[in-house]
């Protein structure tokens, strides 16, 4: 056997050995990524966001083709208010798997924080496009709030109503729909929704405050006074408390 033949044979052997080692090495890397992913989720559950981000970054680096790693990392960035990083990671996740509706929902939330309304609306609509989406109430609530902020009250009311069609016991749904109707000066409808919100969840001061405003505008001064007092009892400090005090001074 010539030296050249021996070298060629050695090269083929090295290639075979590398090919055999490849899948096993890849499995080891995926196992390491899984470990970092699990630790990262545990850190998220403990609200240890720096630790979560560190571990999930490693998971995404070691297994970059797995969309769940980018989604979890994006969620951690979002919770840590690193919105640009959140958007980058979440976009990677949904590009790999467009059926990750929760990732689209988080992406919409990140855009909301940057007041980028149109991309936020698009993300929430894409979340809802998946009939298997387990949390459509999140998307409808956020869409309604965006439209309310933009003064598009009819669109806001439509999305809040869709939320309530799915979850009629949603106190937030009744509250935000009531507030939108109040902005349109639809007082009887606004009172009805806000009363239902208070009935479902009576410990939230702003629910009582907004109900008091609706009652006051409707000429129900005694009921309004009670609502403002209740808001103040629930939280004697903060912006809602100061508003409640101002209304009570006007009523006395």
Image (spheres, rainbow, N blue to C red):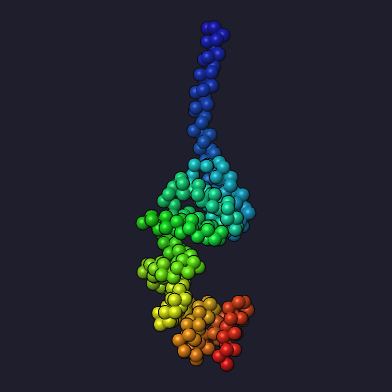
Looking at the image, can residue 81 be seen? yes
Most extreme residue toward the top is 2
Residue 112, image x, y percentages? 52, 60
Looking at the image, can residue 208 be seen? no
* Number of marks: 0
Residue drawn at point x = 56 percent, y = 59 percent: 114
Q: Give the vertical position of 167 relative to 32 (above or below).
A: below
Residue 159, image x, y percentages? 41, 66
- Pick whichever, 110 or 151, lies toward us: 151
Q: Give the vertical position of 45 relative to 160 (above or below).
A: above
Residue 31, image x, y percentages? 53, 42
Residue drawn at point x = 38 percent, y = 56 percent: 129
- Pick whichever, 156 or 14, lies toward us: 156
Residue drawn at point x = 51 percent, y = 36 percent: 26
Residue 110, image x, y percentages? 53, 57
Residue drawn at point x = 54 percent, y = 85 percent: 228
Q: Quadrant of residue 4?
A: top right
Most extreme residue toward the bottom is 252
Image quadrant holding the C terminus, namely: bottom right
């Amino acid at each position: 056997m010539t030296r050249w033949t021996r070298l060629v044979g050695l090269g083929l052997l090295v290639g075979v050995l590398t090919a055999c080692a490849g899948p096993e090495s890849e499995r080891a890397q995926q196992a390491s990524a899984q470990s970092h992913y699990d630790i990262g989720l545990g850190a998220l559950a403990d609200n240890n966001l720096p630790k979560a981000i560190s571990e999930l970054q490693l998971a995404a680096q070691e297994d970059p083709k797995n969309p769940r790693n980018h989604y979890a990392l994006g969620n951690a960035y979002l919770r840590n208010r690193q919105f640009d990083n959140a958007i980058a990671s979440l976009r990677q996740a949904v590009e790999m798997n467009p059926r990750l509706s929760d990732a689209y929902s988080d992406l919409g939330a990140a855009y909301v924080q940057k007041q980028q309304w149109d991309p936020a609306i698009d993300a929430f609509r894409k979340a809802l496009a998946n009939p298997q989406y387990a949390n459509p109430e999140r998307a409808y609530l956020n869409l309604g709030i965006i439209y309310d902020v933009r003064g598009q009250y009819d669109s806001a009311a439509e999305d809040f109503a869709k939320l309530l069609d799915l979850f009629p016991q949603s106190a937030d749904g009744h509250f935000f729909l009531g507030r939108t109707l109040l902005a349109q000066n639809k007082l009887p409808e606004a009172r009805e929704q806000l009363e239902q919100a208070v009935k479902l969840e009576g410990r939230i001061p702003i629910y009582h405050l907004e109900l008091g405003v609706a009652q006051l505008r409707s000429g129900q001064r005694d009921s309004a006074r009670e609502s403002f007092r209740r808001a103040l009892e629930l939280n004697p400090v903060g912006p809602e408390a100061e508003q409640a005090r101002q209304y009570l001074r006007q009523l006395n």
